[in-house]
Amino acid sequence: MNLQHLYYFKAVARMEHYGKAAEELMTSQSGISYAITALEEELGVPLFHKYGRNVRITKYGKVFLEYVEDVISRLEAGIQEMHDLRQPNLQTAVIACMESLSTQYIVELIKLFKASPASRDICFELLQMDTMEMLEGMKAGNVSLGFGNRIDDKDVVSIPIYSEKFVLIVPLGHRLADCQAVDLPDIKNEEFIFFCEGLHIQKLIDNIFQSENLKIHSHYRAATDSMVAQFVESGLGVALIPHSQRLQSYQVQAVELKNCEYRREICMNWLKGSELLTANKKLRDFILSHYEKLNT
């Protein structure tokens, strides 16, 4: 067992797909497969089982993942502390974001910030979390700034910084896959994949259907964009989802929605009354100023 194998295991557990984990880690799928097999042989238990083209983590894998995440977190914290001791003036801006946003938007924001004088002596740590994990991290003091869905919580400030339009995603080969656009009433009899109840994004989707007086029921719910896309990719249904470049990673087709003005607001979230570290405060103030200028 080595550290690289643990990073591979953590990525597969999050992506639930060997190929996508390999792409993210910029390694070969065979290397990922070898690492997981080696871990399973050493531990004597299966960590994943196949689910179509994807994999699902087993009960053994879930337990092992908790320890792996703790080990990696402690190691990275130690490495960061060594860097900070070596460079006492360097500060770290810790940013949490939804998986679908990390490459498409947040890196561009960081790039803009790095070009400003305010970014001097600041480095960045980017974490991927779903909305509920982000909220828990804020209240636990582990996350200062979170980018993603609006967080409906009295203790959180959520400021919209941009928005994404909703599209319908269907499996490849679906009867609607070749359509350029569809009306909502035309898809009312489809099996839908929903987001988990209580999430702000699902409330938006409920409003979209209610605007057309449509009552839609679902047998499947998921917490993140990627999980919803995986359900659709597997042929279990269709879904309304905000459009992003990440959809190109899945075997799904995005179809425009006619006469749908609803959009998902992407918000910058932070805890009310919290004392942000200087690095996070500088980044927050820069982004607020940047989007204020764009909207004037």
Image: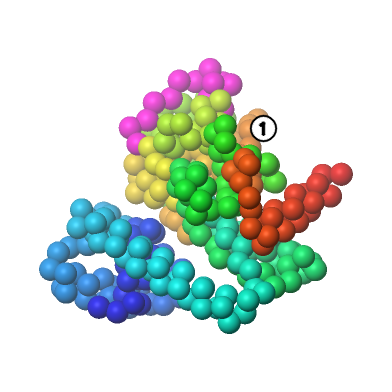
Identify the residue at horizontal 50%, vertical 44% (top origin): 139
What x and y, as percent, mark residue 206? 51, 27
Disc 1: which residue:
261
Is 86 left or right of 202, judged from the image as shown?
right
Bounds of the magenta span? 208-220
Identify the residue at horizontal 54%, vertical 34% (top origin): 153
Is 149 left or right of 289, judged from the image as shown?
left
Callout 1 crowding tier (Cα within 10 Å): few <14, some 14–19, many ≥20: few
Q: In which quarter of the image is the C terminus?
A: top right
Identify the residue at horizontal 65%, vertical 73% (top origin): 90
What x and y, as percent, mark residue 175? 44, 40
Residue reaching furthest to the top: 213
Classify 144 as above or below 152: below
**Quarter of the image where one finds residue 232:** top left
Residue reaching furthest to the left: 44
What x and y, as percent, mark residue 15? 39, 59
Identify the residue at horizontal 75%, vertical 49% (top origin): 288
What x and y, as percent, mark residue 275? 63, 50
The stretch drawn in magenta includes residue 26:
no
Q: What residue type is labelled 1?
A: Glu
Local SS, label 1: loop
Q: Quadrant of the N terminus?
A: bottom left
> Which of the two residues, 7 or 204, is positioned nearer the viewer here?
7
Residue 50 showing in the rendered view: no
Residue reaching furthest to the right: 296
